[in-house]
């Protein structure tokens, strides 16, 4: 295998710049989602009983997000080693390692899985659960901001050659091509 490109977004853009852009995207997503949904609900009363569940869900968002990256690999019967790290002595964060390299198509599905399994259902749920739509939209907007890195990874993977393989590491990922003989 030859390395076509190594991608480390934190090294390329900087941690705080990525964090700031993610925050702005999450804020912008909330504004864009809140206006049409609140108009469709005709300013209904929001129940305060959903606040505690919202806070717990927001604290568990990194763990939920990382598990939704792992979920498609388990469905496709890929051998996955799951590592659980405890962040700030309180919150679990999951990472994964695969025994084999992932194809471009599989990598795209894994990168977009949180959007398919969290963001889209969150937007739909905000339309159906009138009493809790603000909390659901806040959670969904936070997840959209959180998914900003995934979108950057997808943009790089899409540019890769069709027969590329992706190898994930702790500091980003490598796009590999089979060596031609």
Image (cartoon, rainbow, N blue to C red):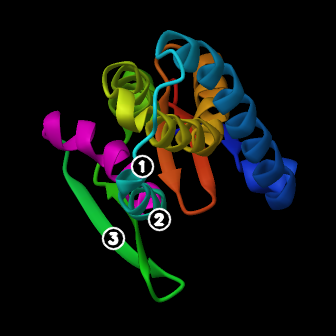
Identify the disc placed on residue 83: 3
Q: Which residue is mark 2?
A: 59
Q: Is residue 41 left or right of residue 125?
A: right
Which residue sits at x=65%, y=37%? Answer: 148
Q: Which residues are magenta?
A: 60-77
Q: Secondary structure at mark 3?
A: strand
Closer to the camera: disc 2 or disc 1? 2
**Residue at 31% of width from left, 21% of height from top?**
128
In front here: 48 or 1? 48
Secondary structure of the magenta portion, mostly?
helix
Whether residue 160 is visible to the viewer of this picture, yes or no, is no
Residue occupying image coordinates x 79% and y 49%: 18
Figure quadrant of residue 112: top left
Disc on the earlier residue, 3 or 1: 1
Dot 2, crowdedness within 10 Å: few (<14), some or many (≥20)? Answer: some
Q: Position of residue 179 (x, y in %)?
A: 51, 31
Q: Residue 179's mark?
A: none
149 vs 124, left or right, is: right
Could you say which is closer to the camera, residue 165 or residue 80? 80
Magenta span contains residue 116: no
Q: Is residue 5 above or below residue 48?
A: above
Residue 120 x %, y %: 40, 23
Tell me the mark number nearer the camera, choosing from 2 and 3: 2
**Which of label 3 and label 1 is nearer to you?**
1
Q: Is residue 84 above or below residue 10?
A: below
- Tag 3 or tag 2, which sits nearer the N-term? 2
Q: Note whether 153 is above or below 127 in the view shown.
A: below
| Gap between marks 3 and 1 measured at Cα | 14 Å
Which of pointers 2 and 1 lies earlier in the amino acid sequence?
A: 2
Name the disc covering residue 65, or none.
1
Q: Are marks 3 and 1 in contact (CB under 8 Å)?
A: no
Q: What is the quadrant of residue 56 in the picture?
A: bottom left
């Amino acid at each position: 295998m030859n390395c076509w490109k190594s991608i480390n977004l934190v090294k390329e853009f900087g941690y705080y710049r990525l964090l700031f852009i993610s925050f702005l995207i999450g804020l912008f997503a909330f504004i864009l989602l809140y206006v049409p949904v609140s108009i469709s609900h005709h300013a209904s009363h929001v129940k305060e009983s959903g606040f505690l569940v919202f806070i717990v869900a927001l604290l568990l968002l990194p763990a939920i997000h990382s598990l939704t990256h792992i979920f498609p690999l388990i469905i496709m019967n890929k051998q996955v080693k799951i590592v659980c790290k405890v962040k700030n002595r309180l919150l679990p964060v999951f990472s994964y390692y695969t025994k084999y390299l992932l194809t471009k198509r599989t990598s795209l599905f894994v990168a977009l899985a949180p959007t398919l399994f969290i963001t889209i259902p969150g937007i739909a749920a905000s339309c159906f659960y009138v009493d809790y739509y603000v909390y659901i939209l806040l959670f969904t907007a936070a997840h959209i901001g959180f998914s900003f890195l995934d979108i950057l990874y997808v943009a790089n993977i899409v540019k890769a050659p069709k027969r590329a393989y992706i190898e994930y590491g702790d500091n980003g990922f490598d796009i590999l091509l089979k060596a031609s003989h």
